[in-house]
Amino acid sequence: MDRWIESTQAGLWSAWMPQTVVAFEGTCVAIPCRFDYPDELRPSAVHGIWYFNSPYPRNYPPVVYKSRTSIVHESFQGRTRLLGDLQARNCTLQLSRLSPELAGKYFFRGDLGGYNQYTYSEHSTLEIVHKPTIMLPEAVVVGTEAELRCVVPDNCPAMKPTVSWLHHEALEGQAVFGQLEEESGTWSQVSLLKFRPSRENDGQELGCQVTYPNTTFLFEAFATLDVKYVPRILQVNSSVEVTEGSHVGLLCMVDSSPLALLAWFKEEAVLREEPATNLTLELDNVTHAHDGIYTCVAENVYGRVNRSLALTVMYAPRKPSVNSSVVAVEGEPVTILCTTESNPEPIITIFKEKQIVATVVYESELLLEIPAVTHEDDGEYWCVAENQYGQRGSAFNLTVEFAPIILVESKCTAARDTVQCVCAVLANPEPVISFELPTRNVTVNETDQEFVYSQKTGYTVTSILTLRGEPDSQLFIVCSARNLYGTKNQQLQFHHSNNLMWAKVGPVGAVVAFAILIAAVCYVTVRTNGASRERGDAGARIQAGSQTRLLPVRGRTALKGRAAVLSAHPLKSFRDQPP
């Protein structure tokens, strides 16, 4: 900053002058100067000398001005004159037609006569410039008023500058003011340009022009506006749908001043950030986990902006999840929940034996509710989810426990002197089956294994009782089945047939038929060999595995002795007893 140079010897030998004086080349300049000397000196005349670049006469510095004579250095001939009155201790010097070689330090020497001469150490430095000074504010910010200053030196009384602005007409709210400022003895013309900057003004060049009336002098300076503003997002991907496994690039382009810090967020997580004008987020082999809202955030010291987009990942349903296999008691309510994930939402269907049980469209879960489950609901189910990108399914079992049900194929068949009873029972858990002859007060349980043949298929247990002898009209047989949920009793209906191959029950029919055939052959053989025996001697033949035995009985009908019970065990022989 310019200031006066003052001696610390006030009242002694001292001087005051600006430290620096500025002027345009070709114009003129006045160097203000005041000096003092000791009070006891009362010179009759005061003279002065201005030296250039050195204060010491013995160094023979160039003489700029000398009051006693007009002899000066050739560089200053016709260019200098004293504006001040030396008698009044004013040593102000004017230089005209300034050229670059005149720039430098100027020293004043007072001459009061005789030995009373003194070169003041205080000096002034002349700076010769070629353009005015444009002073920009610390920051030109959008939304706030900006003020530019064009500073023009005005230190020559003979030449007054005219200052104007260039290329400012389009600035919003622009206005120009002028003022004269003094600092440390030097003067400046200051032109103020005020306006409201916009983003569009960033990079705009403004000029300050200085002219002097009646001359061809023209001095210009230019400055480029560096407008600061909140970041502005120029481009961001629109929301996008992609299929799982694809590659996605999310681009964010920003205009900001100063440079913004760009960042890509997913929800609250920062995925990538760096100072830049554009930032791309690369996503390889996207999965449904990449699905969500992505936000580009741009921030600098003047503000923050953001823009979001939705990335939707389309994918086939995941393997449905079912609340495990279910075991229920008949009559209880059952709820089965099947859930999956997919995009778009799938069609979910629950199948049983390829028949649709329940379905829902464009939902992520399906709730199957059976208010009162029955044994018919038992079995394997499939939950299948499907959309345009694929299909997935999961199997589950519904196990229903229920009391025994005696099936319609349960009956007795009589042929000649053979009776065969079939009792087919559906139950879960597996039932205990017995045959009862109420009129004979006989029940054969599981320990009588030689009388029965049993086979289980799924929840169906088929038991067969085979008896030899001619039944009477009072004979009836009851099938009894029980498990922990109940007991079922049913009298078996009789069917008469002349064909010994009468019992075919499920997959054991062939075994039964074969057993009956062997029994018949053995029976005929024994009758032929024992023709001489008494007519009342009869035999009852029961098959036990691959062996057949005659059982002696009393009377003509073996069935009039003891009832027999069939359980799921090998056949067991028995002997009729009198009632």
Image: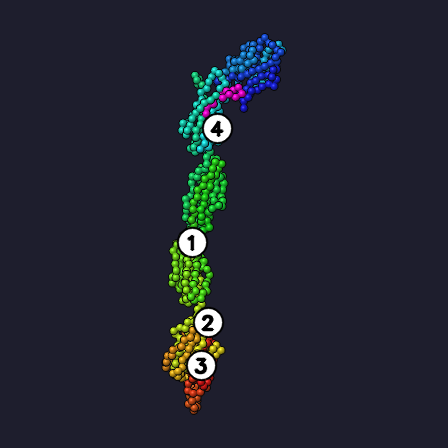
Badge 2: how crowded within 10 Å, few (<14), some, or many (20+)? some
Which label's residue is closer to the chain start, 1 or 4? 4
Badge 4: how crowded within 10 Å, few (<14), some, or many (20+)? some
Front tag of 2 and 3: 3
Residue name at image x 39 percent, y 78 percent: 412
Residue type pointed to by label 2: Asn
Whole-percent x and y of residue 131?
48, 23
**Per the image, is 174 magenta?**
no
Which label's residue is closer to the chain start, 1 or 3? 1
Residue type pointed to by label 1: Ser
Mark carried by residue 342: 1
Q: Under tag 4, what secondary structure?
A: loop
The residue stretch that appears in magenta: 181-192
Q: CA distance from mark 1 to mark 3?
A: 67 Å
Q: Under tag 3, what secondary structure?
A: loop
Residue type pointed to by label 3: Asn
Residue name at image x 47 percent, y 37 percent: 303
The C terminus - image quarter: bottom left
Q: Under tag 1, what secondary structure?
A: loop
Asked if the residue under mark 3 is in contact with the one under mark 1, i.e. CB atoms within 8 Å, the reply is: no
Q: CA distance from mark 2 to mark 3?
A: 23 Å
Whole-percent x and y of residue 185?
53, 19
Whole-percent x and y of residue 97?
49, 16
Residue at the disc numbered 4: 136
Residue 271 visible in rendering: no
Q: CA distance from mark 1 to mark 4?
A: 60 Å
Mark carried by residue 483: 2
Q: CA distance from mark 4 to mark 2?
A: 102 Å
Mark carried by residue 74: none
Q: CA distance from mark 1 to mark 2?
A: 45 Å
Mark carried by residue 441: 3
Which label's residue is closer to the chain start, 2 or 3? 3
